[in-house]
Amino acid sequence: MRITYDTETDALTLVVTRESVDKTVDAGEGRFIDLDDDGQIVAVEILDVSQGFHLHDLMDRFDLKPLLDDFAEHVQTARSLLSEGDLHDALLR
């Protein structure tokens, strides 16, 4: 998984796979789901993310639980590294 944040557009993107995008579903409220030709999630984009967002209404519709569990693990790892100073030190190298 790759997580990116664009400061100019205030967009958070969770890239799940490198598969080609077959279609993009507008899930409303500035949320877009990219799907491959098998209907599997390729990426999730959330616009105006600094204003807050929710995904609970999309959990079952797009089977987001595994993706969000993986995202939460990435966030926890980043927090641990930040608290230990490892991430900061690695970024300065």
Image (cartoon, rainbow, N blue to C red):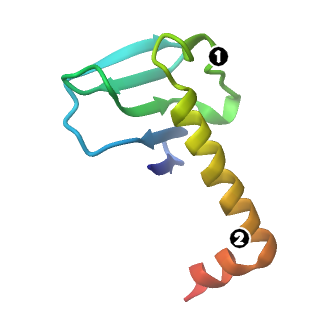
Q: Secondary structure at mark 1?
A: helix
Task: Work out whether residue 66 or residue 32 is closer to the camera in this orientation and state it.
Answer: 66
Q: Quadrant of residue 19?
A: top left
In the depicted structure, whether residue 52 falls above or below residue 91: above
For this orientation, the residue located farthest to the bottom is 93
Q: Amino acid at mark 1?
A: His
Residue at position x 60%, y 85% in the image: 92
Task: Give residue 44's quadrant in the image.
Answer: top left
**Tag of residue 56:** 1
- Mark 2 and mark 1: Cα distance apart in space: 28 Å
Q: What amino acid is at disc 2? A: Leu
Circles 2 and 1: CB distance less than 8 Å?
no
Question: In screen coordinates, is 43 left or right of 93?
Answer: left
Q: Residues within 10 Å of mark 2 (few under 14, many from 20)?
A: some
**Residue 57 image offset from top left, x and y in percent:** 60, 10
Which residue is depicted at the point 26% across and 45% down? Answer: 18
Q: Is residue 44 above or below residue 29?
A: below
Q: Which mark is residue 81?
A: 2
Q: Residue at x 39, y 41 (%)?
A: 16
* The one of 26 and 48 positioned closer to us in this rendering: 26
